Amino acid sequence: MKKALFVLFAVMLVVSACFAEEAETQVKTITFIGRFEFVSSGSDTGSANPYIAVRNDAGHRTSFMVTSDTVITGKDDKPVSLNWITKDDKVHIEYVPAENNIKLAKSIKVLKGW
């Protein structure tokens, strides 16, 4: 009986450690809101993916990498392509930090009324 309890306790300890490690590796999504400036082809930076430049209200320009996994929606919440967004459109970007200070866009939403 003691042996069974010890084995059960050991299994629970290992499982909880696995879940704790998994929780630590999740990356927090960060929000950036600003005005769309332009799209840059990936060849400018040696990447196969395009980048977009967005300027916030304080005038700070930030670049985001756009991949095939990036969800892009228009003012009507319907999917659109990247070339549908025009200069000075107000956009809401959800991104995650990646290697080499790259900001990887997870979603880009064109905001209404701007």
Image (cartoon, helix red, strand yellow):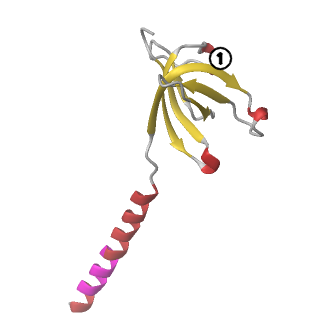
Above-or-below relation of 85 to 28:
above
Identify which residue, 13 or 66, lies in the foreground: 66
Residue for point 74% across, 39% down: 47
Q: Position of residue 39 (x, y in %)?
A: 67, 23
Above-or-below relation of 90 to 61:
above
* Placement of the N terminus among the 4 image quadrants: bottom left
Residue for point 33% across, 69% down: 16
Left or right: 14 with respect to 85? left
> How many numbered dots are placed on residues in this image?
1
Q: Residue furthest bottom?
A: 2
Q: What amino acid does circle 1 point to?
A: Asn
Residue for point 57% across, 39% down: 104
Residue for point 23% across, 84% down: 5
Q: Residue furthest left?
A: 1
Above-or-below relation of 13 to 56:
below
Q: Residue furthest top?
A: 113
Q: Residue furthest front?
A: 58
Q: Which residues are magenta?
A: 5-12
Left or right: 103 with respect to 11? right
* Placement of the C terminus among the 4 image quadrants: top left
Identify which residue, 57 or 31, lies in the foreground: 57
Above-or-below relation of 4 to 23:
below
The kind of secondary structure element at disc 1 is helix
- Within the magenta stretch, is there residue 108? no
The residue singled out by tag 1 in the image is: 83
Instruction: Please name the predominant secondary structure of the magenta segment in the image.
Output: helix
Q: Position of residue 36 (x, y in %)?
A: 57, 19
